[in-house]
Amino acid sequence: MAEIHSDVVIIGAGAAGLHVALAIHNDPYFDNKSIVIIDKTNKDVNDRTWCYWEKDSGKWDQIIKHSWAHGSFFSNCKEKHFDLSPYRYKMLQGLDFYNYSKAILLESKNFRWYQDEISEVIHTKDLHVKGRDHVYTATYVFDSRMPDEFIQESQSNKPILQHFKGWVIKTDQDFFDPDQFTMMDYRMPWKDETSFFYVLPIHSREALIEFTLFNMELLNEHDYDIMLKRYIKEVLHLDNYEIVEQEYGIIPMSAFRFESLSNGNHILIGTAGGWVKPSSGYSFKNAERNALKLIRNIKDKRNINSGIISKRFRFYDTLFLDVLKHHNDLGPKLFTLMYTKNDVRKIFKFLDEETNLIEELSIIWHFPKIVFMKSLLKYFFQSITRRGH
């Protein structure tokens, strides 16, 4: 098996891997370094959609599919319409990001791309990355594969999953308002569990309709389709449309300490590195921010995870996920309270982990206090037990 040498290996060319690659590409510190990117596929299909918010114009505006300045929230008892200014909510298709990133990286003599499947990383003086076709050696390995430790724990302690199916639909007449998106709609729940729809109109005759659940059990594929059909007919009151694209995904919502599994220069990134916001599943902007922090930590010879995980916000996420896990029927109430009792800009700031303690308490104060207190007591008891061991 051929051996390929480089200074850096990046395993996985999703959002995290490509953000790390672009951060390396843009930093003169790595001008004389060789970088290998490895992925199981050539990233030539539109396999996902990322949504995120940011203030005003942004780095990816040239390739986003659409953006919105106005949004809506619906539940059975409340609805709220909001102006996001100075934020905009933005939609970016995976293929557009892959093509943009590959065009930049593959023009550089420093970067090489291999389509291969990695089975393990062997820790020797140089890290050895074992693939199906080659063995790759490097000083640094950035690894986006889910660690075995998390997979094993998930078998005995199931995490909350964010799972979803979406349709891009087209109509033959103007139907959607392209300036207004639906962030969450809880008016058609799946059983008595936390589930919602969102609607992202791309223009007046096209929109992405997505059905999402935050719970512990996946549905069969037919059930997602039934719910999408029902929502489009009974809530949107739309009868004639064509499905032109579909997407499906699963994101673990977990406060598992992924970052503790990075070992020396073998660094976990993306979902595997704890970069996905546990309580929301948002990942794209986190990946961009954390890639830059990671590169800065390497250059400054600091702890590799310095500044990436906030203990305070990890604590909030842990409590929220515990409530969602043991009181999943409360999910619609929790999100209704969050979005109807607070300014949406403060929520975005909170989810971006940019709020101060007073702002955070003002959001948390509206949540049901008894169930959160039970989770808080459980959290402290488990912390004491871990320290005792």
Image (cartoon, rainbow, N blue to C red):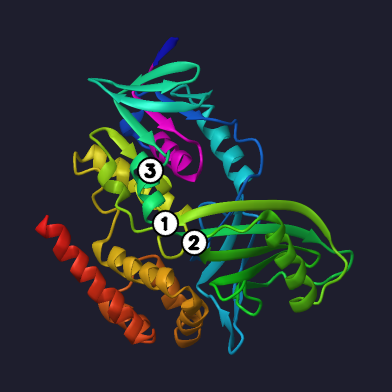
- Identify the disc placed on residue 158: 1
Q: Quadrant of the N terminus?
A: top left
Give the residue at x 42% y 68%: 325
Residue 55 in view (yes/no): yes
Expressed as whole percent of the image width and height from the top left, the position of residue 314 reads 30, 63
Give the residue at x 56% y 76%: 192
Cβ atoms at labels 1 and 2 below 8 Å apart: yes
Give the residue at x 50% y 65%: 215
Q: Which residues are magenta?
A: 5-26
The residue lying toward the viewer, choosing from 142 and 96, is: 142
Mark 2, residue position: 216
Relative horizontal placement of residue 63, taking residue 251 as reference (left or right): right
Few, some or many residues within 10 Å of mark 1 (<14, 14–19, 20+):
some
Three-letter amino acid code at disc 2? Met
The residues bearing labels 3 and 2 have C-alpha atoms spaced at a distance of 24 Å
Residue reaching furthest to the bottom: 77
Mark 3, residue position: 269
The residues bearing labels 1 and 2 have C-alpha atoms spaced at a distance of 7 Å
